[in-house]
Image (cartoon, rainbow, N blue to C red):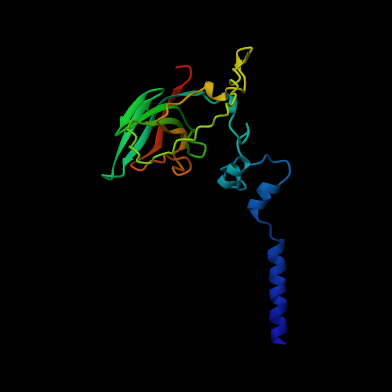
Amino acid sequence: MRPVILIAAAFAAGGAMAQTADPALDDILAPGQPAPAPGDPGAPPGPSELDELSQGAADGDFPNLEAVDKRKPVSVTLRALDKIIAKYTDIEIPMDGTATFGTLTITARTCDKRPPEEFPETTAFIEIADQAPAPASNLKIPEPKKNSAKVKSEPAPAAESHGGAISPAAPAAAAQLPSNTVFSGWMFASSPALSALQHPVYDVWVIDCKTVKADS
């Protein structure tokens, strides 16, 4: 009988504790009272910092692209490596300027650098010419045999202009590069091997681009 009495007493004590109200809960849940301000002793806990960050800003999660300042390139910084002596040099070239490294003549046309809030990337359009003389070749090309029959050659069609635009008959007339050009295109700082200079002695890749506001 004693264990039964002890169990009954425990149930009675639990019921009495359940009926006793918590004064703090009474202050919060009492009708007609104003809600406590955040930070008061009896105020419920507010949203955590992680919850506030996950909700994002009131004006949207993405920046206003139209409000981003437009920038223009000023100079591009390249790193040139001489593979013969294993020595590299950093070269800063202004836009449409030219620099010399060894036998290379490097011209910077334009560059672009992403803002800090985006994935970091620096690109530059570079033209490189090799001023080294072409090596002499001992290859002898046999002369074609003379044929008595005359072949009538027709002149190539001349380029026609329509409203100032060059016709597709002469696509190379718009931009002609020197014969000693060894590279002309975009270079990427994050992937130097994606569009690299193919040269037996030198390697050149972009490392930085300086820009200013377009209205300055």
Which quadrant holds the C terminus?
A: top left
Task: In this rendered view, identify the residue nearer to me: 55 or 198.
Answer: 198
Task: In this rendered view, identify the residue nearer to me: 32 or 50.
Answer: 50
On the image, the x and y values in percent for residue 144 come to: 48, 35
Q: Is residue 119 visible?
A: yes
212 is higher (above) or lower (below) than 83: above
64 is higher (above) or lower (below) than 197: above
* Residue positioned most to the left: 85
On the image, the x and y values in percent for residue 102 come to: 29, 34
Q: Is residue 48 visible?
A: no
* Residue positioned most to the front: 148
| Rendered residue at 72%/73% (across/down) | 11
Q: Quadrant of residue 203?
A: top left
| Rendered residue at 70%/63% (across/down) | 18
Task: In this rendered view, identify the residue nearer to me: 55 or 157.
Answer: 157
| Rendered residue at 36%/27% (across/down) | 93
The count of marks equals: 0
Which quadrant holds the N terminus?
A: bottom right
Q: Is residue 146 left or right of residue 134?
A: right
15 is higher (above) or lower (below) than 114: below
Task: In this rendered view, identify the residue nearer to me: 212 or 182.
Answer: 182
On the image, the x and y values in percent for residue 138 come to: 35, 41
Q: Quadrant of residue 109?
A: top left
On the image, the x and y values in percent for residue 53 come to: 58, 42
45 is higher (above) or lower (below) than 204: below
